[in-house]
Amino acid sequence: MDSRMERAESVFAGTTKSKLIADLTFGDNTYKLSGEGFANPHDGQHTLEMHCYGTEPVPVNWCIIAPILQYPFRVFTQYTGTGMYDFFKTSFPGGLVTEMVATFKCGGIISGTHNISYVKDTVVCRAQLVCENFSTESVALSHGLGPVLPCYELIDGVGVDEVSSTMDLEWKDNNAVSYKCRLESEISSNGAANFSPLRHWVAHDSKVVDATPNRLHFSQRDKARANVINFYKN
């Protein structure tokens, strides 16, 4: 286990580039999304600039889509301290596969797959997302939502090569009314057998860096830090 951690430390040393290639299906339309960014995996900070091809923006608010696209870059989570096994970094160079479902307060659902690989010093995410059951009056389609609020992600080992993730995401609209979703994921290691980590939490704090009025461009910075609560430590 220690040797895997040491190897992961050497692979992700210093600033690492990121790349996003995604298809988002909403109704009869499929939108092509892309992104580029940079991160310091040992600092837990990742900035991702996302774009929508063409002249028609995605119907779902970027503040909703951005964390769903960015949080699967879990290799950029900061892991420090004893008893903190980093399942995500130690899954490379093989990679990670994430199957996720986001269930929203209004009944809407976003489901999909993220394949994370490491190619020529760049962490690449290829994602396929499908949006279903969103009415035309859904808050997720409005322009008045603020950025996703700070949240905790529960990570738990479910067997060799696999962990589960559960988090509750929340946004506020212009009237400070809350809008929520439960995001559940299964993440598997796409390579040599990996160890299963103990249950722990990852804190996320995301900030909007830039957003264009035409809603074709959106940039977000996420700070992710793993935590273990030990009630018996003196």
Image (cartoon, rainbow, N blue to C red):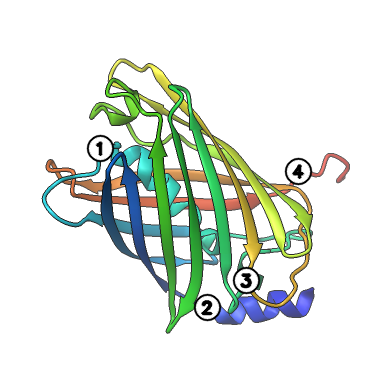
The answer to whether one can see residue 111 in this image is yes
Instruction: State the CA–CA distance, disc 2 to disc 4.
Output: 27 Å
Q: Earlier in the sequence, mark 4 or mark 3?
A: 3
Q: Would you name the residue on which mark 1 appears?
A: 59
Task: Give coordinates of residue 39: x percent, y percent.
Answer: 42, 65
- Number of callouts in the render? 4
Instruction: State the CA–CA distance, disc 1 to disc 4.
Output: 40 Å
The answer to which of 82 and 124 lies nearer the viewer is: 124
Q: Is residue 16 left or right of residue 218?
A: right
Q: Is residue 37 left or right of residue 204?
A: left
Which residue type does callout 4 highlight? Ile
Q: Which marked residue is nearer to the observer: mark 1 or mark 4?
A: 1
Task: Please say if 185 is above or below 159.
Answer: above
Q: Would you name the residue on which mark 3 appears?
A: 190
Task: Give coordinates of residue 120: x percent, y percent.
Answer: 42, 84
Q: Residue at x 76, y 43 (%)?
A: 229
The secondary structure type at the circle numbered 2 is loop
The secondary structure type at the circle numbered 3 is loop
Which residue type does callout 2 highlight? Ala
Q: Would you name the residue on which mark 4 appears?
A: 229
Q: If the image is split into quadrants, where does the C terminus sit?
A: top right
Q: Earlier in the sequence, mark 3 or mark 1?
A: 1
Badge 2 crowding class, 10 Å Cα cut-off, few under 14, some 14 to 19, many 20 or more, is few
Q: Which marked residue is nearer to the observer: mark 1 or mark 2?
A: 1
The answer to which of 88 and 103 lies nearer the viewer is: 103
Q: Which marked residue is nearer to the observer: mark 2 or mark 3?
A: 3
Q: Earlier in the sequence, mark 1 or mark 4?
A: 1
Q: Residue at x 30, y 28 (%)?
A: 145
Q: Would you name the residue on which mark 2 appears?
A: 13
Which residue type does callout 1 highlight? Pro
Q: Residue at x 30, y 61 (%)?
A: 35
Instruction: State the CA–CA distance, disc 1 to disc 2.
Output: 38 Å
